[in-house]
Image (tube, coloured by chain):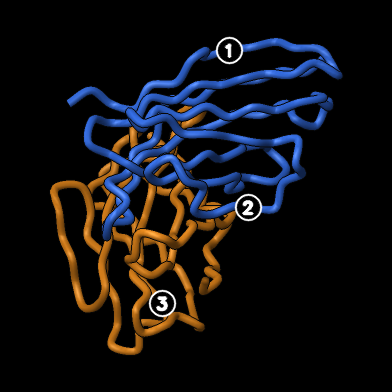
Amino acid sequence: LAKTTQPISMDSYEGQEVNITCSHNNIATNDYITWYQQFPSQGPRFIIQGYKTKVTNEVASLFIPADRKSSTLSLPRVSLSDTAVYYCLVSPNFGNEKLTFGTGTRLTIIP
Amino acid sequence: KAGVTQTPRYLIKTRGQQVTLSCSPISGHRSVSWYQQTPGQGLQFLFEYFSETQRNKGNFPGRFSGRQFSNSRSEMNVSTLELGDSALYLCASRTGQTSYEQYFGPGTRLTVT
């Protein structure tokens, strides 16, 4: 599995757009990029998944450049409730691969 | 659909004892994965079961074991508990076919004294 590198922590003010970048230089052709969000003492929650270019859902956007060696999770107009740890994962979208979570990015939203 | 449920939510055991944790996946999901989360090691993959067969295994000692039943419910067992086994144990389910969208349960907080 490709390893990922994310900033350990980030701070942002309420109402701003937050971009968290994940580096995955060894991503393979059949790897997908998935982001999870985790609040304290809860299980991670799936946010978004993508393969290339841009993916958007009601929660976030995921930007993936052409070389796919990095990806950026974008959270629009964050609120205090977005304070959490965000994990970037890279893996094939097959059923028989195990997932490896990195250290994640601890995002703190400041009022 | 009901989410992933885990029982018990909290557990206190003493060293040397064994413990069994239970996970009920989302209806229709055939894959159940278990993770251990500690402040020092983060989220670590324990094992995955798909259709009652262990499909993947992480780097944990043999004291950690699991199984899956025909209704996809899963249990994990830890024998001869050590202080370092204190952690949040998370279960996640997914369809198991092609999607990596996993749904996590609330976890079982195990404290070993």
Q: Which mark is residue B10?
A: 1
> Which residue sits at x=56%, y=57%?
A102
Task: Give the chain letter at badge 1.
Answer: B
Q: Look at discs 1 and 2 and give the one toward the viewer.
A: 2
Report the front residue among A32 and B95: B95
Task: Give the chain letter at badge 2.
Answer: B
* Mark 1 → mark 2, Cα distance in angstroms: 24 Å
**Element under disc 1:** strand
State the quadrant of the C terminus of chain A: top left
Q: Residue type at mark 3?
A: Ser
Residue A103 in the image: x percent, y percent? 59, 53
Q: Is residue A40 above or below residue A31?
A: above
Residue A34 in the image: x percent, y percent? 35, 60
* Mark 3 → mark 2, Cα distance in angstroms: 26 Å
- Chain letter, colour orange in render: A
Q: Which mark is residue A70?
A: 3
Horizontal arrangement in the rendering, residue B77 relative to residue A49 (left or right)? right
Horizontal arrangement in the rendering, residue A36 relative to residue A99 (left or right)? left
Residue A31 in the image: x percent, y percent? 37, 74
* Colour seen for chain B: blue
**Element under disc 2:** loop
Quadrant of the rendered image containing residue A45 = top left
Task: Give the chain letter at badge 3.
Answer: A
Q: Is residue B17 above or below residue A31?
A: above
Horizontal arrangement in the rendering, residue B55 relative to residue B39 (left or right)? left
Name the residue tied to disc 2: B58
Q: Earlier in the sequence, mark 1 or mark 2?
A: 1
Horizontal arrangement in the rendering, residue A11 relative to residue B71 (left or right)? right
Quadrant of the rendered image containing residue B77 = top right
**Element under disc 3:** strand
Residue B54 in the image: x percent, y percent? 51, 47
